Amino acid sequence: MAVTACQGLGFVVSLIGIGGIIAATCMDQWSTQDLYNNPVTAVFNYQGLWRSCVRESSGFTECRGYFTMLGLPAMLQAVRALMIVGIVLGAIGLLVSIFALKCIRIGSMEDSAKATMTLTSGIMFIISGLCAIAGVSVFANMLVTNFWMSTANMYSGLGGMVQTVQTRYTFGAALFVGWVAGALTLIGGVMMCIACRGLAPEETNYKAVSYHASGHNVAYKTGGFKASTGFGPTAKNKIYDGGARPEDEVQSHPSKYDYV
């Protein structure tokens, strides 16, 4: 019962994590404009992995996609690749884990096959979660670097007496969604790997016992032996031929012909 609960809980947690990774990848708020020095502005900029958007004070939002691939920074392309790999591995892991659930019986599938599929899906979830966390962390590191570089350029004019206007970007909501989703997927994968140990059949060691045929020779007495019918003292004896007796027993009862 505990194995089934651990496997089911791991599946649900991984499902939520994969959904969060997909949502974070599609979100546009990976980086948002920093309003620390300019809290009142007519426009608000934010950027995602696939497009950048501008929201005006009137509520109108205009987004423009990145229509180039070679012109994008290499780090941004690496983040895209990591998120896509995480989604693909997570989707395959979900498909495998559905057939590996202990509460679902498909044909004559053995528990050993379900244990192998559970372990495979758990490893896929772990790699998917790591890819998502790595992608979000790389993008966050890129934001931090650009933020401090922009801050240094703002106060570089006339020894810091003149502040130039530059747009700085800080962490967006998609980064936090990606971190949480990656952690959930990673936890779900670990739980699936733990459940695999309970699904695997235990190996039983049987002690081998060898049986040998008896080494005593059996001799057959042609004279037969007498047996009573059991009806009183005057009952007649019957002689049965072909009685099998061991050789030692035959030699222990000599007959009258041995003295001739």
Image: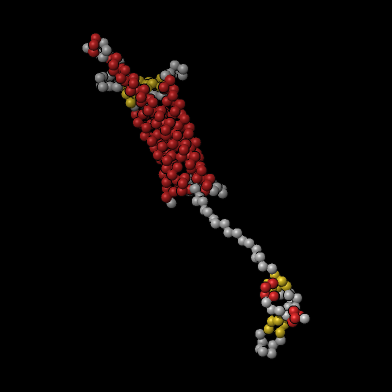
The answer to whether 168 appears left or right of 9 in the picture is left
- In the picture as drawn, the residue positioned furthest to the front comes out as 259
Task: Pinpoint residue 183: horizontal percent, then vertical percent.
Answer: 38, 36
Task: Pinpoint residue 47: horizontal percent, then vertical percent.
Answer: 37, 22
- Quadrant where the C terminus is found in the figure: bottom right
Which of the colour schemes (rainbow, by chain, secondary structure, one colour) is used? secondary structure
- In the picture as drawn, the residue positioned furthest to the right comes out as 260
Task: Pinpoint residue 123: horizontal percent, then vertical percent.
Answer: 46, 38
Residue 16 showing in the rendered view: no
Q: Which residue lies at the image location 48% right of the left edge and 43% below the top edge?
A: 118
Task: Pinpoint residue 173: horizontal percent, then vertical percent.
Answer: 34, 29
Q: Which residue lies at the image location 52% right of the left edge and 47% below the top edge?
A: 112
Q: Nearer the viewer, residue 71 or 149?
A: 149
Number of numbered discs visible in the structure rendering: 0
Q: In the rendered image of this protein, does residue 53 appear above or below residue 109?
A: above
- In the picture as drawn, the residue positioned furthest to the bottom comes out as 234
Q: Nearer the viewer, residue 164 or 255?
A: 255
Q: Which residue lies at the image location 51% right of the left edge and 51% below the top edge?
A: 203
Which quadrant of the figure has residue 212?
Answer: bottom right
Q: In the rendered image of this protein, does residue 202 appear above or below residue 48?
A: below
- In the picture as drawn, the residue positioned furthest to the top comes out as 158
The answer to whether 160 appears left or right of 117 in the picture is left
The answer to whether 219 appears left or right of 201 in the picture is right
Residue 150 showing in the rendered view: yes
